[in-house]
Image (spheres, grey):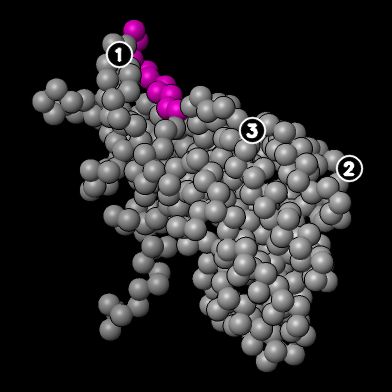
Amino acid sequence: MNFKDLAKKYNTPLYIYDLNHFSNQYNNLKNAFKGRKSIIAYAVKANSNLSVIKHFASLGSGADCVSIGEVKRALLAGVDKYKIIFSGVGKRDDEIKEAIEKDILMINVESEAELAIIHNIAKNMGKTARISIRVNPNIDPKTHPYISTGLHENKFGVDIETAKKMYIFAKKSEFLNPVGIHFHIGSQLTELEPIKEASAIVADLVRSLKAINVDIKFFDVGGGLGIRYKDEELIEPYDYAQAILSTLSGLDVTIICEPGRFLVGNGGYFLTKVLYEKINGDKRFVIVDGAMNDLIRPSLYDAYHKIEILTSVQNPKISKANIVGPVCESGDFFAKNIDVPETKAGDLVVIYSAGAYGFTMSSNYNTRPRAAEVAIENGKDRLIRRRETFEDLIECEIDYMV
Ligand SMILES: *Cc1c(COP(=O)(O)O)cnc(C)c1O
């Protein structure tokens, strides 16, 4: 990939997505479930650019959405409505109503209160809502606590006993159709055992539901497959599929998985330029034009991203430095105390593995227009989101004029 040409053509800060990499990841996972009914439902929140969703839709992907906005994105991008799932721990009434109207595959329910509300809304509409229930299997996924979701101490899902009660309620209601079951224990998972344990617990629940005539058709194992940012041990898609399948003997279900990071993380790059350097005492800072508002993972999770400095200095000296942005926060950094060659203004800095939870978590903090996004496919580049302008940023503010 010629980062210099791309930076010249589109300027920085800039996101670049390798769609061929996205396809490979999708196909690897899909093939791992070969011979079984399966749906890969791309977790739209990882990277929700319409062109990215459309790319996955063209491969046959479904979509896992956590707001009605994401459901609308998925529909607009051409995802089959019967492959769209609406998850999330808090849904507004209008979101539930719209999801039922749009006739998507199912709404993932995360509490008894939510189930009662969906029942009432569907009843008022004279419709039947397809639902699944998110079970919290109380499994420690052994990942970063901020991205762990499958423990009772996390806010997600309901315990097994509550889930059973909810299925019985749904089974009795003519306005609810309990077609699925769901769990999602966390993100950036690098160990198979917790997934297998969770899957076994939930599969047992499916068996006991069958005994009371609740027939679960969709077994949704969530997302969370990890990627390599640095030197992580990875779960192979084949082993992942085998681990899940080994818990499903005797069950005729369609397996749904909802990967986000796995599909897009390593195919994304964030390009930023050196503005200048400064030294405070014995600390060296390389200040770049991208910032935490563009890519917040280092600030938020202390996440590691591989960084490459394309310096134009001949035979540069190398010393420790922090790579920081212009935002007025000490937490505004991409890396701390890494080896950095001498740089000149305009030199490019490439931040790897920025395809997931990069642009989608970006903001306009400090009135900074968000970066442009470019897709690369079969060696050709194209703009898929133009750089924001100052006018875009103030568009919704209306009172100051009067
Ligand atoms: C965030 C999320 C995902 C995707 O997680 P990744 O770690 O990006 O694979 C899938 N399902 C649900 C319910 C989620 O909240």
Where is residue 156 shown, x and y percent of the image?
A: 52, 61
Answer few, some or many: residues within 10 Å of disc 2's Cα (few below 14, many 20 plus, some between 14 and 19).
few
Camera-side residue of 310 and 324: 324
Question: Residue 76, relative to residue 24: is it above or below?
Answer: below
- The Cα atoms of the two marked residues, 3 and 2, are separated by 20 Å
Q: Is residue 267 left or right of residue 303?
A: right
- The amino acid type of the residue labelled 2 equals Gly
Q: Residue at x 52, y 46 (%)?
A: 140
3 or 1: tag closer to the N-terminus:
3
Q: Secondary structure at mark 2?
A: loop
- The Cα atoms of the two marked residues, 2 and 1, are separated by 53 Å
Range covered by the magenta-colored residues: 306-315
The image's mark for residue 35 is 2
2 or 1: tag closer to the N-terminus:
2
* Residue at image mark 3: 235
- The amino acid type of the residue labelled 1 equals Ile
Answer few, some or many: residues within 10 Å of disc 3's Cα (few below 14, many 20 plus, some between 14 and 19).
some
What type of secondary structure mainly makes up the magenta span?
loop
3 or 2: tag closer to the N-terminus:
2
- Mark 2 residue CB less than 8 A from any atom of ligand 1: no
Which quadrant, please, contains the N terminus? top right
Question: Residue 311, relative to residue 198: is it above or below?
Answer: above
Q: Is residue 7 visible?
A: no
The image's mark for residue 287 is none
Answer few, some or many: residues within 10 Å of disc 1's Cα (few below 14, many 20 plus, some between 14 and 19).
few
Question: Residue 203, relative to residue 402: is it above or below?
Answer: above
Q: Residue at x 50, y 31 (%)?
A: 229
Where is residue 292 shown, x and y percent of the image?
A: 35, 45
| Snapshot quadrant of residue 299 | top left
* Residue at image mark 1: 318
Residue extending furthest top?
315
